[in-house]
Amino acid sequence: MKDWRTGADSLRVAVTAALAGGDTAAERAKAVLSITAADLDDVIHAQFEAAAVALTSGLGASPGAGVGKVYFSADDAADAADRGEDVVLVRNETTPADVHGMMVANGLLTTRGGLVSHAAVVARGWGTPAVVGADTIVIGDRYFSVGGVVVAEGDVISIDGATGDVVLGEMATASGGPPEEFFTLLSWADEIRAGHLAVRANADTGDDAMKARELGAEGIGLCRTEHMFLAVDRLPVVRRMILACDADEEGAALEELGRVQQADFEDILRAMDSLPVTVRLLDPPLHEFLPPVAELTLKEATEGLSDVEQQELRAARTWAEHNPMIGTRGVRLGVLKPGLYAMQVRALLAAVQTLRDAGLHPIVEVMIPLTVTRPELALARSWVEAEIEATQSDHSDITIGTMIETPRAALRAGDIAHDADFFSFGTNDLTQLTFGFSRDDVETRMMPAYLDLGLLPANPFDTIDQFGVGALLRLAVEQGREAVPGLKMGVCGEHGGDPASIELFHEIGLDYVSCSPYRVPIARLTAAQAVLASSSK
């Protein structure tokens, strides 16, 4: 376990040397090149003060030190946090229905999943320490066991989101916070990368957006609107929409969702005033907003279900798919339920108008997820444009683009570009679909063996695959800009905060990278290093 002072010392040495050398552009560049992503992580996140023997370990999915009492359900974690307890939420894996418990946790620990699993992505976005894929842990009824050690609900554990270590008991943490040299060095990095590679953040709330801006984000590259549906007061409304028996019931639920979504959009746009915000319309399949079929089936057999729960079970079975990540999600869901996307766009336009009336300057980019053909994007674009026209206000500055996250979309980028104002590469799904790897399954069992045997040079969900996925990115950039010169392009997958991946993104000519807020400083540093590396060739 590293001492946070290591990174602070590195920053002080680099900045002091540059100033002593005359504070020239060359000295500043030398200082920027001397700092690593680990140095920045050390000063951003809390660290443990001393080493300890780990009970078990998994994948370090979100850096930092997390200490708290173990709870096994989101509801119990939320209740404990309300009592003033520090909490570590332990799950086999998390789903969007767990978000209210994840929000209050000091740390997240899962037995399954990889670096782009739900728990990992959400934790990085919030700066919450997380360890995933700790597959030696067996969860029982209000306890978990590792070998012969039993950890009961309410027992305290400590997790290290950088190393993946899980320690029994409470460990002391320390963080000096970023020293002044942290801000000095990043300002130098910004000067170097200016005009080359911008850095945005993936953020879904006003608070996340404010934190991202504090850390130097130049906009939001991915706002996942589905996360707005998962608050305790929103999820029942989403379920009413799914369970609606007729158009009137569905319309009433959508109208209620639209009101709260407008308020969410206003918070994010206000925090990012005058900077671009890319709003992705609803992406996940609808079954994610319902209780799991297995959970309801078990309750039906043991306790019985209420009338509403019976409806939820029927709906969950109806929407269940064998492979939902390549099923009815993204724009495909919009085709089946166009009223859902229309509601989101109306709420977004209302938020824009409210902020304009208040003298602010919201900049909005509407992003359609998972398109694979030009006609598909053209149809989805027409939904957005119809809502814009219906407002009878000037929203000509609102742009409409799409995610490129399937091999077909990358191969047909030149065609799709004719109906897009921008592309954003979703490299998490693009990696999954290019390799044929399930990103939630391969990282804990198969990936270690492949890396040990040298069958892969690196985990492709951590660092971009240069020759397969990278080739698709390069082709899509070339075809897209050949069809539409100057087409804006960025990346919003988790690779946007990975140093080795950022070098490729700069090389192929992307305009920006977008990453979790707490990865923004690392992206700023690494983008500058990529610019310096390319200029020296």
Image (tube, rainbow, N blue to C red):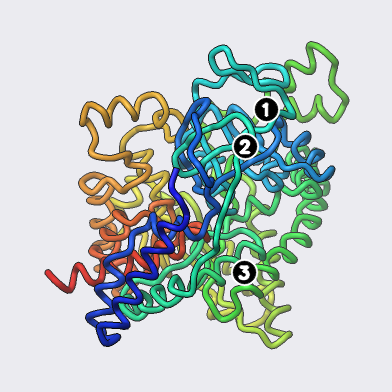
**Which residue occupies the extreme right position in the image?**
306
- Please say if the residues under marks 1 and 2 sit with CB atoms less than 8 Å apart: yes
| Label disc, if present, on residue 257 of the rendered structure | none
Left or right of residue 176, residue 387 in this image: right
Q: Position of residue 375 (x, y in %)?
A: 43, 55
- Please name the amino acid that badge 1 sits on: Pro
Please state which of the two labelled residues, at mark 1 or mark 2, is closer to the viewer.
2
* Circle nearer the viewer, 2 or 3: 3
Identify which residue, 515 or 227, lies in the foreground: 515
Looking at marks 1 and 3 on the same chain, the residue that comes earlier in the sequence is marked by 3
The residue tagged 1 is: 292
Q: Secondary structure at mark 1?
A: loop
The answer to which image quadrant residue 69 occupies is top right
Badge 3 crowding class, 10 Å Cα cut-off, few under 14, some 14 to 19, many 20 or more, is many
Residue sitting nearer the eye, 532 or 261 = 532
Crowding at label 1, few (<14), some or many (≥20) Cα neighbours within 10 Å? some
Q: Is residue 73 left or right of residue 7?
A: right
Distance CA(mark 2)–CA(mark 3): 25 Å
The image's mark for residue 95 is 2
Q: Is residue 499 above or below residue 451?
A: below
Across and down, in percent, residue 205 comes to 65, 61
For residue 271, which quarter of the picture? bottom right
Where is mark 3, residue-wise? 210
Residue at horizontal 20 percent and vertical 46 percent from the top: 467
Quadrant location of the N terminus?
Answer: top left
x and y percentages locating residue 288 in the rendered image: 64, 37
- Tally the numbered discs: 3
Three-letter code for the amino acid on which mark 2 is drawn: Thr
Residue at 49%, 53% in the rendered image:
369
